[in-house]
Image (cartoon, rainbow, N blue to C red):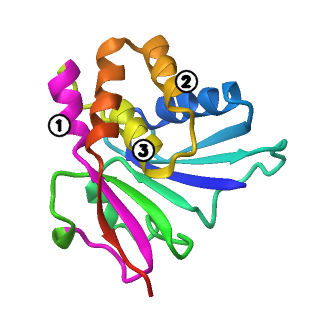
Amino acid sequence: MKEIRFHGRGGQGVVKSAQILVETVVEGGLYAHFIPFFGVERKGSPVFGFLRIDDKEIRVKCQVYHPEVLMVFDDTLLNLPQTFLGLVDHGVVIINTEKTVESLPLPEKPMKVFSINATGIALERFKKPIPNTAMLGAFAKATGWVNWQILQEKIRLAFNNDNALAAIDAYENVQLVKQEEF
């Protein structure tokens, strides 16, 4: 079973992006489910989400405690202790940021870090600071866990072609910025 934890802020499209991933995975013949977690439900507040993907039915219905992938929609959340909590060794971290990897508060841990300016792509493509579809493109490229063609179509159906183009931009431009082997 693959486990992914999402870290974002209200209004960034965390829940919708996870729903699109679930639909993509299921259409691709696997099983998936997403559990959102909200603290204070208002725009800008930290939100979490827990996604699981497997080739058999998923019966676990709780938080993800040892994610293989972290999707960080807002780089200011890197300062929170729970962001990296439980990340498996050699896990993948995908960060929406325009900062250099050296300026990010990353823990000393063996992991792969991918960087994409998803908010910048969203602003360019559809004039809104909502990074979710660009983050989906980065996720598809960084992990290879979803069918890229199905994902693009699911994004078009959920939103529009501009959002699909944002995902394509991120897919083509996400960068592996750190890979530590301890």
Three-letter amino acid code of the residue under disc 1: Gly
- Distance of label 1 from label 2 (alpha carbons): 24 Å
Q: Quick one: 147 or 50, which is closer to the camera?
A: 147
Asked whether residue 11 appears in the rendered view, the answer is no
Q: Is residue 114 left or right of residue 139?
A: left
Looking at the rendered structure, which numbered label has been put on residue 147? none
Of the numbered discs 3 and 1, the one sitting upstream in the chain is 1
Relative to 54, say whether 27 is above or below.
Answer: above
Magenta segment includes 121: yes
Of the numbered discs 1 and 2, the one sitting upstream in the chain is 1
Three-letter amino acid code of the residue under disc 2: Ile
Q: Position of residue 68 (x, y in %)?
A: 57, 62
Relative to 111, say whether 129 is above or below.
Answer: above
Please give the residue where the numbered disc 3 appears in the rendered image.
141
Please give the residue where the numbered disc 1 appears in the rendered image.
120
- Disc 3 packing (10 Å; few <14; some 14–19; many ≥20): many
Q: Which residue shows up at 21% across the image and 67% down it?
A: 101
Which segment is the magenta one?
A: 104-126
Please give the residue where the numbered disc 2 appears in the rendered image.
150
Is disc 3 placed on a helix, strand or loop? helix
Is disc 2 placed on a helix, strand or loop? helix
Q: Which residue shows up at 21% across the image and 33% down it?
A: 121
Q: Which residue shows up at 38% across the image and 30% down it?
A: 133
- Disc 2 packing (10 Å; few <14; some 14–19; many ≥20): some
Q: Position of residue 32 (x, y in %)?
A: 70, 39
Relative to 102, say whether 30 is above or below.
Answer: above
Quadrant in the picture for the C terminus: bottom left
